Image: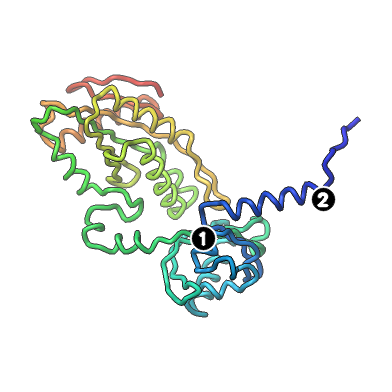
Amino acid sequence: MQAKSDVSPSAASDSGAARMRALMVRAPMAVGFVKDGHFELVSEHFNHLFGHGDDTDLVGQSTRAVYVSDAAQLSVHERMSAAFISGKPLDDEFEFVRRDGSRFWGRLQATPVQWDSPAGESLWLLEDVTVARQQRMLPTWTAKHDALTELANRREFERRLGEHVGSRRHEPVSVLWVDVDKFTEVVAAMGSEVGDHFLYGLGQLLITKVRASDLVARLEHDHFAVLLPNCDQHYAEIVAEKMRSGIAAYRLRWGLHRTRVKACIGVVQIQSTLETVDAVIGAAVLACTEAKAAGGDSVRVFISAGGYEELAG
């Protein structure tokens, strides 16, 4: 005999609605639900982002209220529809307008509530990226950062690494080389757009595994490097293993696309025999190559010329 629930469907519905209202008030992010070109439900942060407060609300208003022009609304709508039909969310930056007429740049992440009905209700996540966008436009920023992942680029990484090679400060400094296994297969199967979003997400994941004083960079394609000042080989191994396991557990969810990969990591502590930046990077790459040759999803440590140490993987 099946036990009867003590909670009626209407009570469960009321409870769900109450939870949603609490979430929309307290969530520290701009969240909105849109249907038929109108805001059905928005978070308090979403309202504040557009200059609304206790006396005014975006709920019930047309989405046209947040666009700078009719043409802008049409353009975003067309791009959103095309993305949803192809099974992908929309993730891009657009210029929006507040209630008082002031403008800001926002990163809009929109996805259908139900993928089998892409023209139905959609979920919007919005973030004010005005300052970040201005920084990206500065020549000094573009010269030091990778445009796709917003991490440091090769030039900046080599410059920072060069400050430690040959240094007489005697503080231990280590370098990691991260190579994603079989990433070309992801791109071949899902396309370069999905691959780009995967690389961005992977870069953000790597940042969570290091200290604020460390430097994570994308050097080329699916290769990342990490500079660990004041970090000896032992602790560098620990960081590398955290990164390896984190990548193995990471899943890209991009619309209807789902994928996961693994990675190999080479570790090297700067030593007197590695006299140049290229030598240090080369040692880390060689250690990573050993990890790949062993089957992937593993960490290897460069000890000395021709010597490697295997870590768990």
Which element type, helix, strand or loop, lies under badge 2?
Answer: helix
Q: Residue furthest bottom?
A: 70
The quadrant of the picture occupied by the C terminus is: top left
From the viewer's perspective, tell me whether residue 220 is left or right of residue 190: left
Residue bearing mark 1 = 90
- Residue 86 visible in rendering: no
- Picture quadrant of residue 224: top left
Q: Residues within 10 Å of mark 1 (few under 14, many from 20)?
A: many
Characterize the local packing of mark 2: few (<14), some (14-19) or many (20 or more) Cα atoms within 10 angstroms. Answer: few
Residue 226 can be seen in this image: yes
**Colour setup of the view:** rainbow
Q: Position of residue 200 (x, y in %)?
A: 40, 49
Q: Say left or right for 180 vs 14.
A: left
Which residue is label 2 attached to?
10
Q: Amino acid at mark 2?
A: Ser
Please tell me whether residue 121 is drawn above or below residue 280 in the rendered image: below
Out of 104 and 23, give the one closest to the viewer: 23
Q: Disc 1 vs disc 2: Cβ atoms closer than 8 Å?
A: no
Location of residue 85 (image quadrant):
bottom right
Q: Is residue 163 above or below residue 33?
A: above
Q: CA distance from mark 1 to mark 2?
A: 34 Å
Q: Work out whether mark 1 precedes mark 2 in sequence or the reverse, and give the earlier one.
A: 2
